[in-house]
Image (cartoon, rainbow, N blue to C red):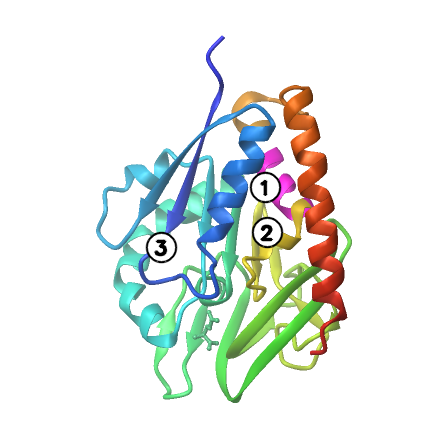
């Protein structure tokens, strides 16, 4: 029987990729394959054919400097209705830092430039005077302890009814005060955590894959494809555990 295929689309990988955020696609790809799915990775850059989005089973976007965010802005407004309808249709998405900010209503840079977002997350971001840099740990009800690295000047304020991804244990989080971090709506997750974040947070990676296979194939569980891949996943998990322990022991 032919393997079922998942299409993973990277959003603006040319401009929005810092601290290895594009690596999230490789991690999703590898894990999905170990669970027995075939994968196809597509890139959507400015003015590309919209098919890379409409065919996507999972969409990933990374962080970027203010200049990168400015560069994609016009196109982002062009594809805004498509992204919103995919999000409403529960296509799983993971947006990091720069794209996380632009999935809110707007990001005003330190220079006073107002960059309009797509408004999927009910939140606004304003560039501050200091950069919020360091190793971060977040406690999330759904995903356990999330570990990553943050570097942003933007201060994000969530609307009253906007769910966060979790509570900050170590780090600055959305608003710089170490309270909440990230945002979740439908099956879309936004976070300031780089890393690439999925390298140290397999629960989040598997949740995204699960949402995709549930939506596309009606599956309710992820299981290793066979004994070899089961052993491979267990080995991978041991490495990840070690990486998490080392990352967690680092000072902020
Ligand atoms: N340019 C944005 C900020 O500084 C996002 C940075 C990032 O993606 N790491 O807040």
Please provide percent x and percent y for residue 175: 62, 78
Residue plotted at (48% across, 52% down): 23
Residue plotted at (57% across, 23% down): 36
Q: On the image, numbered disc 3 is attached to which residue?
A: 13
Secondary element under disc 3, as helix, strand or loop, is loop
Q: Depth check: 109 or 64 in front?
A: 64
Q: Depth check: 163 or 58 in front?
A: 58
Magenta span: helix, strand or loop, mainly?
Answer: helix
Q: On the image, numbered disc 2 is attached to which residue?
A: 198
Structural crowding at the residue carrying mark 3, measured as other residues with C-alpha within 10 Å and reported as few (<14), some (14–19) or many (≥20)? many
Quadrant where the C terminus sits is bottom right
The reply to whether residue 91 is visible in this rendering is no
- Taking the magenta stretch, the answer to whether it contains residue 221 is no
Q: Quadrant of residue 59?
A: top left
Please provide percent x and percent y for residue 87: 49, 45
Q: Residue furthest bottom?
A: 129
Q: Which mark is residue 232?
A: none
Q: Are marks 1 and 3 in contact (CB under 8 Å)?
A: no
Secondary element under disc 1, as helix, strand or loop, is helix
Q: On the image, numbered disc 1 is attached to which residue?
A: 208
Residue plotted at (59% across, 74% down): 157
């Amino acid at each position: 029987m032919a393997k079922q295929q998942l299409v993973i689309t990277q959003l603006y990988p040319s401009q929005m990729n810092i601290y290895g955020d594009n690596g999230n696609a490789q991690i999703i790809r590898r894990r999905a394959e170990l669970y027995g799915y075939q994968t196809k990775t597509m890139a959507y850059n400015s003015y590309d054919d919209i098919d890379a989005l409409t065919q996507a089973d999972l969409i990933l976007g990374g962080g970027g400097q203010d200049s990168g965010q400015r560069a994609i802005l016009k196109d982002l407004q062009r594809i805004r209705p498509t992204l919103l309808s995919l999000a409403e249709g529960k296509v799983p998405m993971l947006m990091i830092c720069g794209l996380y900010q632009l999935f809110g209503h707007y990001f005003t840079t330190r220079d006073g430039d107002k960059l309009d977002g797509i408004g999927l997350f009910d939140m606004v971001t304003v560039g501050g005077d200091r950069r919020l840099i360091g190793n971060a740990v977040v406690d999330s009800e759904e995903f356990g302890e999330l570990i990553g690295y943050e570097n942003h000047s933007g201060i994000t304020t969530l609307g009253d009814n906007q769910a966060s991804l979790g509570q900050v244990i170590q780090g600055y989080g959305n608003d710089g005060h170490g309270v909440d971090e990230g945002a979740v709506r439908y099956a879309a997750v936004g976070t300031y955590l780089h890393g690439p974040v999925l390298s140290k947070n397999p629960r989040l990676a598997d949740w995204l894959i699960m949402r995709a296979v549930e939506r596309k194939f009606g599956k309710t569980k992820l299981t290793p494809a066979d004994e070899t891949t089961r052993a491979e996943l267990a080995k991978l998990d041991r490495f990840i555990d070690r990486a998490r322990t080392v990352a967690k022991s680092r000072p902020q």
